[in-house]
Image: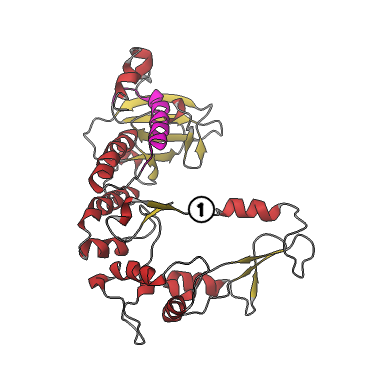
């Protein structure tokens, strides 16, 4: 994950954070390591120390309360593992009071950290508060730049509102991704209603996003994607392009090995790509019964599909992929890369 620093000039350099993902942590704890700290569970038991606090957000407070056992430790999902959250009950003000008074072993100045959070507050104010309802610095939360879990990136909105206009393209791209994830730009056809499900971004959507990214990178001066990452992404899109039929959006009807029938609206045949996966379904080995071009000029940005009841009526034979009809067609369709 990459996060910009405070000022425009400082933001030209990125700071890399190493994140211990849940599956890595689980694998680490699941291994038989005799030197892992022991608790009452004996050899191989472990205590996971987390810096989570209830004051971070209402959702965090609710989640922590749901797992609260009344003691210092709570049981982890893994056997012989426990969770300890030493600062769970600290308020935002208590955290800032400590950060501004204590010397840091790594030699950083936490007043610079305070300035970072101040600029992420509406109006540039970062008060220490006693009364409820007044925003404090602790409410300006930072996470992944393009995170679409939250409705609005209020921290970045405040940065733009406080004069950091160069960040506006970053905010606009994040909001565009959020709109796609929320299906606000989806025109759902009647053939997939009711019971519509949403899958990956369309190939055309991903291509456009990849075209936009270098432009935003140039405009802001912030490295958003390295040359190596760009080359790897283009290679992935080339692999996905093997399934292009050349007809734009098509209704694909798949007969899965499990016996189910699935109708898919996409601009490429997922079965012809390394992806093979459509939500919970694997299309490898499935029979493609038909590919019917979508007659309407539909506004869409994501793959849509529906599980059918019974065998559908096949209206049209599946056309050959673009690469089979014209040997250089697939290359031309990804020439942008």
The residue located at (55%, 53%) in the rendering is 21
Quadrant including the C terminus: top left
Name the residue beneath numbered marker 1. 18
| Quarter residue 293 falls in | top left
Would you say 182 lies left or right of 75 here?
left
Quarter holding residue 238:
top left
| Residue 66 at least partly seen | yes
Q: State yes or no: residue 246 in magenta.
A: yes
Identify which residue is drawn at 52% across, 29% down: 284
Residue 181 lies in the magenta-colored region: no
Residue 131 in which image quadrant: bottom left
Point out residue 116 in the picture as x, y percentages from the top left corner: 34, 66
x, y percent for residue 54: 48, 75
Q: Position of residue 92 (x, y in %)?
A: 42, 77
Q: Is residue 267 left or right of residue 282?
A: left
Residue visible at 30% across and 31% down in the picture: 249
Q: Pick whichever, 59 or 103, lies toward us.
A: 103
Q: Which residues are magenta?
A: 225-247
Residue farthest to the front? 107
**At which x and y percent is residue 187?**
26, 43
Is 244 placed above or below 140 here? above
Residue at the (40%, 23%) spot, across then down = 242
């Amino acid at each position: 994950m990459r996060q910009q620093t405070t000022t425009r000039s400082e933001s030209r350099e990125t700071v890399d954070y190493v994140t211990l993902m849940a599956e890595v942590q689980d694998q680490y704890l699941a291994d038989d390591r005799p030197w892992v700290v022991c608790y009452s569970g004996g050899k191989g038991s472990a205590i996971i120390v987390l810096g989570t606090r209830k004051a971070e957000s209402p959702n965090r407070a609710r989640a922590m309360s749901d797992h609260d056992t009344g003691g210092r430790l709570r049981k982890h999902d893994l056997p012989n593992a426990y969770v300890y959250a030493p600062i769970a009950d600290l308020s935002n003000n208590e955290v800032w009071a400590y950060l501004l008074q204590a010397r840091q072993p790594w030699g950083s100045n936490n007043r610079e950290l305070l300035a970072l959070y101040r600029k992420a507050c509406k109006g540039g104010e970062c008060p220490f508060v006693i009364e409820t309802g007044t925003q404090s610095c602790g409410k300006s939360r930072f996470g992944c730049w393009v995170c679409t879990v939250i409705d609005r990136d209020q921290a970045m909105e405040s940065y733009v509102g406080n004069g950091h206009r160069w960040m506006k393209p970053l905010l606009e791209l994040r909001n565009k991704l959020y709109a796609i994830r929320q299906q606000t730009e989806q025109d759902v056809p009647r053939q997939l209603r009711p019971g519509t499900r949403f899958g990956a971004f369309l190939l055309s959507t991903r291509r456009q996003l990849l075209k936009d990214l270098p432009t935003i990178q140039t405009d802001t001066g912030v490295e958003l994607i390295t040359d190596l990452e760009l080359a790897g992404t283009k290679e992935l899109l080339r692999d996905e392009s093997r399934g292009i039929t050349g007809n734009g959006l098509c209704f694909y009807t798949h007969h899965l090995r499990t016996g189910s029938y699935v109708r898919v609206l996409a601009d490429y045949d997922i079965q012809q790509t390394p992806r093979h996966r459509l939500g919970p379904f694997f299309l490898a080995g499935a029979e493609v019964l038909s590919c019917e071009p979508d007659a309407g000029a539909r506004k869409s940005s994501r793959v849509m599909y529906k599980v059918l009841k019974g065998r559908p009526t096949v209206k049209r034979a599946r056309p050959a992929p673009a690469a089979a009809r014209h040997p250089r067609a697939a290359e031309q369709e990804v020439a942008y890369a």
